């Protein structure tokens, strides 16, 4: 027999009304009583099936290790030392393979391409645009980005696999909670030290949309892989020279770590400001379980971090670097009147740029290098050589190149009028400026909001210019 | 010797060659399998082992943020596998718990593989008991057994299986141990060759028990095909709005029919 429709509707309402009646009858403690029953049954079953040789579930060394890495006094120093070691290994280890790839792609293969195109009588501008522009940009990004990422991501993934990340989050949780943000932002911030785009995606672990937005917006202040080379080079040239030679290494390394820590401080301040103003709300509580330490699976970690992280990020960088390389070549080679577009811009923006302790070359380089922070330094050198008329040093207008030694690079920059202030402000601006276009695109994909994408892109530039302005005014006042 | 070797090779339980990892290809699947469990118990690792995909795994809770889906083929049946976010319970209203709960309830998987951390069995069982209230077809993967052994924990998996009324398979997904047996039981439960008799939470007091029984009767009359009428009764008793709405709209009754249709289509 099939019940007629009205009958079913009646029965349904009857059922719900009946449930309401029972609920009133039982009283408030139903939920607690259900949870209690489940817990007591789980306990009973466990006692029937589990026999344990040891009383402690976590082994002793794990408990002692947790006490050390999350302790009030040692937690943060250990965290900084571990992160510093990872970065040091990345920077040191990447030098040799970077140089090898560069010599293969740039020193060896580039001339072959050039002579090949010459033998085909390809017009100058096509040859320049594609071989000196697009190809060199791609070769440069691969040689500068691939080795550090291939070292950094596996190391970071090993730490993650071992179980250290939740401990970092545990340490940082209190600070982020005070800033009105989610404790898990500590995790996304750490990911940002590798790549901001990866950090923005990682913000998915945060449930509350408000706190997730804060994590996404502030991720830019985690100094990413692409910016470390700029920091290290400029610190070695300008900060290292301030102290006696035997202290130079420490001073410049200290300056770089200082910039990274400033990034963390800015993250906290901005998170606090956002959560008190446009993204108001309570910090949501969450339970963070400290998982057991697990021996990392080395081979699998190497494989997945190379394929899923390194190649993924590198591919996106290449996609954006190729058009950027063409633009660099064009601004160096299209002339209006007697000067190239690049030189026009540099001359035009120099007065303003010098006033805030930077220069026109740096501003133009940051516009051209939006696709990837990795190409900032070569762009600066190329533009400096072009605008200072030091053509005998480079490879010709608009051709990106890398100078062999730090000293040579420093000589060129100082010859062009760079001072310690320029160095310091470049380091600051490298930390506080718009995210690269890969990250901007990722922010758009993750938030789906043009408004927040624009805000995350424009706000840091304004902040960076203000910070540079203030530092410059202090500098002028005291020197 | 030779004889037994051949037998073993023919037995589906010991022949991992029967597994064909299909990656993201989930076309025309016969059975739907859900992966549920506490955070950081290795669900994504099992997911990767079975589908051949490389869902990011990491040693921290809450890493799987969106539902991941993949496919595999075993014993000539195609399976769609869904990796659910890890949760500690299904009783609260946070988004991740709702995703997991709604999928098991409305997605009506043919099998729910519950992955538990064998070093923390008691706490993990809290979730297992809640899942067994919703679905009557589940397989328990007693995972991280390598860690359990290291910590000197011994679990009588036969007794556990008897208690819970579902298959219990010791696994160590990181080392790919126990995967064949797990597949074999997924296969048997999907095909209804293994009939689960899921454990039902006892300890309620008399008054609550009476209310649950009465409501369960009414629900069974109204929706005779519903497999989890007792659970629906408890939710109604608690005043769970999602379930009240699902009863009002008749969705509760429909979902089961849909999955029956899908099943007959597949056959």
Image (tube, coloured by chain):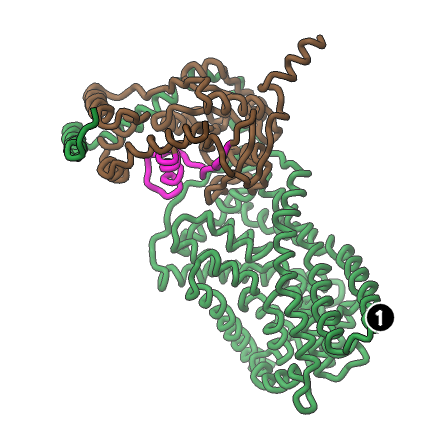
Chain colours: A green, B brown
Tell me the chain of label 1.
Answer: A
Q: Residue A43: horizontal and vertical position, in percent?
A: 39, 21
The image quadrant that residue A281 belongs to is bottom left
For the question of whether residue A327 can be seen, the reply is yes
A280 or A264: nearer the eye?
A: A280
Is residue A64 something one can see in this rendering? no
Q: Quadrant of the C terminus of chain A?
A: bottom right
Identified at 37% across, 51% down, the residue is: A283
Residue A95 % position (x, y): 75, 57
Q: Is residue B103 magenta?
A: yes
Within the image, what quadrant is residue B126 found in? top left
In the rendered image, the vertical position of residue A394 relative to residue A71, given as above or below: below
Image location of residue B202, percent across then percent down: 30, 19
Magenta region: B79-107
In the image, residue A460 lies in the stretch drawn in magenta = no
- Of the pair A74 and A23, the residue shown nearer to us: A23
> Looking at the figure, which quarter contains the N terminus of chain A?
top left
Q: How many marks?
A: 1
Please report the residue visible at 47 percent of the width from the left and 19 percent of the height from the top: B167
Nearer-the-camera pick, B175 or B73: B73
């Amino acid at each position: 027999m099939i019940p007629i429709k009205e009958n079913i509707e009646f029965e349904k309402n009857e059922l719900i009304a009946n449930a309401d009646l029972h609920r009133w009858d039982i009283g408030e403690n139903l939920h607690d009583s259900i949870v209690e029953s489940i817990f007591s049954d789980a306990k009973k079953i466990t006692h029937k099936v589990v026999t344990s040789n040891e009383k402690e579930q976590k082994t002793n060394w794990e408990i002692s290790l947790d006490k050390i890495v999350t302790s009030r006094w040692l937690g943060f120093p250990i965290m900084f030392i571990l992160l510093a070691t990872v970065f040091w290994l990345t920077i040191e280890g990447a030098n040799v393979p970077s140089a090898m790839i560069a010599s293969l792609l740039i020193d060896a293969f580039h001339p072959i391409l050039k002579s090949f195109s010459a033998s085909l009588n390809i017009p100058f501008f096509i040859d320049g645009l594609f071989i000196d522009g697009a190809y060199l940009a791609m070769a440069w990004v691969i040689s500068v980005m691939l080795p550090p990422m291939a070292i950094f991501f596996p190391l970071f993934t090993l730490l993650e696999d071992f179980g250290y990340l939740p401990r970092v989050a545990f340490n940082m949780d209190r600070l982020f909670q005070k800033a009105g943000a989610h404790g898990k932002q500590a995790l996304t911030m750490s990911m940002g030290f590798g790549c901001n785009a990866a950090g923005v995606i990682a913000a998915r672990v945060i449930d509350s949309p408000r706190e997730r937005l804060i994590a996404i917006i502030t991720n830019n202040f985690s100094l990413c892989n692409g910016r470390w080379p700029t920091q290290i080079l400029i610190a070695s040239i300008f900060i290292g020279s301030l102290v006696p030679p035997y202290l130079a290494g420490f001073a410049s390394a200290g300056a770089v770590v200082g910039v990274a820590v400033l990034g963390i401080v800015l993250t906290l301040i901005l998170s606090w400001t956002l959560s008190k103003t446009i993204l108001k709300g309570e910090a949501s509580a969450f339970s963070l379980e400290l998982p057991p330490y697990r021996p990392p699976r080395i081979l699998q970690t190497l494989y997945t971090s190379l394929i899923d992280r390194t190649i993924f990020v590198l591919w996106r960088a290449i996609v954006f670097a190729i058009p950027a390389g063409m633009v660099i070549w064009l601004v160096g080679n299209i002339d209006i009147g007697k000067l190239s577009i690049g030189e026009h811009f540099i001359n035009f923006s120099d007065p303003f740029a010098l006033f805030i302790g930077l220069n026109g070359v740096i501003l133009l380089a940051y516009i051209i290098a939006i696709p990837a922070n990795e190409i900032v330094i070569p762009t600066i050198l190329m533009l400096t050589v072009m605008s200072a008329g030091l053509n005998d040093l480079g490879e010709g207008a608009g051709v990106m190149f890398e100078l062999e030694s730090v000293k040579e690079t420093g000589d060129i920059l100082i010859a062009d009028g760079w001072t310690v202030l320029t160095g310091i402000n470049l380091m600051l601006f490298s930390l506080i400026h718009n995210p690269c276009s890969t990250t901007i695109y990722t922010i758009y994909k993750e938030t789906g909001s043009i408004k927040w994408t624009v805000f995350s892109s424009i706000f840091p530039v304004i902040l960076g210019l203000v910070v540079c302005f203030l530092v410059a005014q202090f500098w002028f006042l005291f020197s | 010797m030779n004889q037994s070797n051949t037998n073993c090779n023919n037995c589906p339980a010991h022949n991992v060659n029967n597994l064909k990892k299909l990656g993201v290809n989930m076309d025309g699947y016969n059975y739907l399998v859900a992966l549920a469990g506490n955070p950081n118990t290795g669900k994504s690792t099992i997911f990767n082992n079975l589908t051949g995909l490389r869902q990011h795994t990491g040693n921290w809770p809450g890493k799987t943020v969106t539902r991941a889906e993949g496919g595999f083929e075993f014993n000539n049946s195609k399976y769609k596998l869904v990796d659910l976010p890890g949760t500690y319970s299904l009783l609260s209203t946070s988004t991740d718990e709702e995703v997991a709960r709604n999928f098991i309830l409305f997605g009506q998987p043919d099998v729910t593989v519950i992955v538990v951390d064998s070093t923390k069995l008691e706490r993990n069982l809290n979730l297992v008991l809640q899942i067994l209230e919703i679905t009557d077809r589940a397989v328990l993967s007693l995972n991280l057994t390598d860690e359990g052994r290291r910590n000197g924990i011994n679990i009588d998996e036969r007794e556990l299986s008897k208690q819970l009324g579902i298959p219990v398979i010791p696994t160590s997904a990181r080392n790919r141990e126990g995967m064949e047996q797990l597949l074999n039981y997924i296969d048997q439960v999907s095909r209804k060759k293994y009939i689960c008799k899921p454990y039902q939470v006892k300890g309620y007091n008399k008054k609550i028990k009476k209310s649950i029984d009465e409501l369960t009767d009414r629900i069974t009359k109204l929706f005779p095909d519903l497999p989890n009428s007792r659970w629906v009764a408890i939710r109604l008793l608690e005043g769970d709005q999602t379930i009240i709405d699902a009863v009002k709209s008749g969705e509760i009754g429909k979902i089961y029919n849909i999955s029956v249709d899908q099943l007959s289509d597949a056959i």
